[in-house]
Image: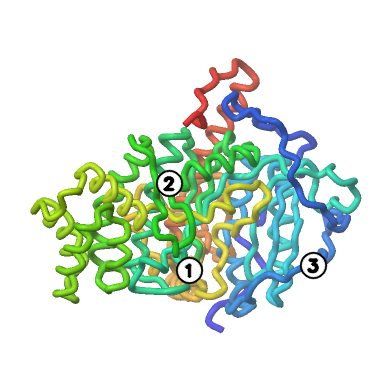
């Protein structure tokens, strides 16, 4: 193989043990609610954290084993996976706390076994277990009231989820009824535009309607994106508030075969108006342009079913029937052109305008898997794991530059390992000085560079900008955590108005 599996890891310095107490974040008044008791029974083994034995296998098994070679996966974990930064992100600080120690991890092993309720007190224990188990991927669950490994020793109801990031899931398979370029797991730049639109709409709503600031978007590795809302208020939301937020963002109703999935009251809510403003340009570029969605007779009939006037519909049907290859842009323009000719005496211009707005939303508004967002106990794939089907890394997406993100250019694990080998071949040990930015969590690898700092392996690869963005995101989150701690120890901030009153 072109790469080496090193016994050493970039960030191998020891971390202190978890503290006995966790500085919990008290909810602001707008999110106060009764404790939610909805929680499944637990039955995990009693395991000591310092030397965890092979954990219990949960049923049913996880889907599809990894297509990435086990040695390649191990090399990735040893040389590239940012364990220390992931720890800081989930721990909300540098010194280990219960935010990390009581967090559930679920591992999918190379033989397809699925291990639930794994937990680790420190970043080092976490890293060592991942290297030992060498999973094809792992998922992140909630923080529990007690160590999830101890669940078998507890009576029912003693272990409850107490916090987790508010998460959202966008999958392009939910757009299969409208995208004309790809189906199922396949994607291209044309249909990825739907994910880009969804990121813009959801990110804007979370910031402007709910006041959330720390939203981490992550590429799923193949055909979608996940959002992790990491603000303390979001992490502490009970399930009923999570359901309410998911419902607030869920405009499309019914399945993809429904005749009309958007039925909104007028005047439109500010969130909907803002979404329309974001989507109207993209509608022209995707649905009418790249996708040419209304080109086929079947899709043209679906469009006509969403229009409010039968006389107008008949005129459009006749015009389009005479020109079977008429593109979607022309068909969309025909609606207003024929409406202005007065062919229908019953047509209400306001009703037509409203119908066209609903069509824009039906074809371009985010199609969320709302169930992912509604419950704290839902597990979601970790950032920076490898997608087993594509070999691509699940890298963060900067929502401010969503238009620039290209999923097909995201590095694969084989590319990254080859980049390390190429860099090391061009920069033999002791030949140059390299400046590496200081920062919490930086660590040295096995490559010695005489007279200068030692590069971490990820800095030799195209993974570097993604890790750097993740580091900057964590820095902003930890800054708020420290400010919140000072507020709790001093004067609490004034409560904010309740955004759920909509």
Whether residue 476 is visible, yes or no, is yes
Q: Position of residue 161 (x, y in %)?
A: 73, 44
Q: Nearer the viewer, mark 1 or mark 2?
A: 2
Q: Nearer the viewer, mark 2 or mark 3?
A: 2
Could you tell me how far apart the alpha carbons at marks 1 and 3 are, in whole angstroms? 27 Å
Please indicate whether residue 118 sits to the left or right of residue 405 in the image: right
The numbered disc on residue 202 is 2
Tell me which corner region of the image, top left, top right, bottom left or bottom right, holds residue 125: bottom right
Could you tell me how far apart the alpha carbons at marks 2 and 3 are, in whole angstroms? 36 Å
Q: Which residue is depicted at the point 52% across and 73% down?
A: 391
Which is nearer the N-term, disc 1 or disc 3?
3
Tell me which corner region of the image, top left, top right, bottom left or bottom right, holds residue 303: bottom left
Residue at the limit of the structure toward the left, as seen here: 341
Task: Name the residue that disc number 1 marks.
Answer: 222
> Toward the viewer: 395 or 206?
206
Please indicate whether residue 182 sits to the left or right of residue 217 in the image: left
> Toward the viewer: 240 or 170?
240
Q: Secondary structure at mark 1?
A: loop
Which is nearer the N-term, disc 1 or disc 2?
2
170 shown above or below 392: above
Give the total of numbered labels: 3
215 shown above or below 4: above
Which is nearer the N-term, disc 2 or disc 3?
3
Disc 3: CA contacts within 10 A as few (<14), some (14-19) or many (>=20): some
The numbered disc on residue 57 is 3
497 shown above or below 313: above
């Amino acid at each position: 193989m072109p790469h080496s599996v090193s016994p050493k890891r970039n960030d191998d310095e020891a971390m202190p043990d978890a503290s006995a107490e966790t500085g919990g974040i008290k909810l602001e008044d707008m999110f106060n609610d009764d404790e939610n008791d909805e929680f499944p029974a637990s039955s995990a083994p009693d395991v000591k954290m310092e030397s965890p034995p092979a954990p219990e296998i949960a049923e049913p098994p996880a889907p599809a084993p990894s297509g990435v070679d086990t040695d390649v996966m191990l090399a990735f974990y040893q040389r590239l996976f940012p364990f220390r930064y992931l720890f800081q992100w989930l721990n909300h600080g540098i010194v280990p706390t219960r935010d990390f120690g009581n967090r559930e991890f679920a591992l999918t092993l190379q033989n397809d076994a699925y291990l639930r309720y794994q937990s680790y007190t420190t970043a080092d224990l976490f890293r060592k277990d991942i290297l030992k188990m060498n999973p094809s991927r792992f998922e992140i669950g909630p923080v529990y009231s007690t160590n999830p490994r101890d669940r078998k020793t507890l009576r029912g109801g003693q272990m409850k989820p107490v916090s987790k990031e508010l998460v959202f899931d966008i999958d392009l398979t939910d757009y299969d009824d409208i995208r004309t370029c790809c189906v199922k797991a396949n994607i291209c730049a044309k249909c990825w535009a739907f994910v880009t639109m969804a990121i813009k709409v959801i990110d804007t709503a979370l910031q402007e309607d709910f006041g959330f600031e720390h939203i981490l978007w992550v590429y799923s590795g193949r055909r979608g994106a996940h959002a992790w809302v990491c603000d303390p208020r979001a992490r502490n939301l009970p399930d009923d508030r999570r359901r309410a937020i998911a419902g607030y963002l869920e405009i499309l109703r019914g399945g993809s075969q429904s005749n009309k999935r958007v039925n909104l009251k007028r005047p439109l809510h500010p969130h909907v108006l803002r979404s329309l403003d974001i989507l109207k340009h993209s509608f022209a570029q995707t649905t009418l342009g790249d996708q040419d969605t209304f080109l086929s007779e079947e899709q043209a009939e679906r469009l006509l079913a969403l229009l409010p006037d039968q006389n107008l519909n008949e005129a459009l049907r006749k015009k389009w029937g005479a020109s079977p290859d008429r593109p979607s842009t022309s068909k969309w323009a025909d609606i207003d052109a024929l409406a202005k000719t007065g062919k229908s005496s019953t047509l209400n211009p306001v009703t037509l305008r409203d119908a066209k707005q609903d069509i824009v939303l039906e074809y371009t508004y985010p199609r969320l898997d709302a169930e992912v967002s509604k419950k704290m106990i839902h597990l979601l794939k970790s950032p920076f794991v490898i997608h087993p089907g594509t070999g691509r890394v699940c890298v963060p997406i900067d929502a401010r530059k969503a238009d620039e993100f290209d999923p097909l250019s995201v590095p694969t694990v084989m590319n990254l390992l080859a980049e390390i080998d190429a860099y090391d071949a061009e920069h033999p040990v002791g030949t140059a000085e390299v400046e590496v930015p200081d920062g919490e969590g930086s660590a040295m690898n096995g490559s010695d560079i005489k007279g200068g700092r030692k590069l971490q392996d990820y800095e030799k690869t195209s993974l570097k900008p993604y890790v750097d963005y993740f580091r900057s995101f964590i820095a902003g989150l930890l800054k708020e955590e420290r400010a919140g701690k000072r507020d709790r120890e001093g004067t609490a901030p004034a409560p904010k108005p309740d955004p759920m009153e909509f």
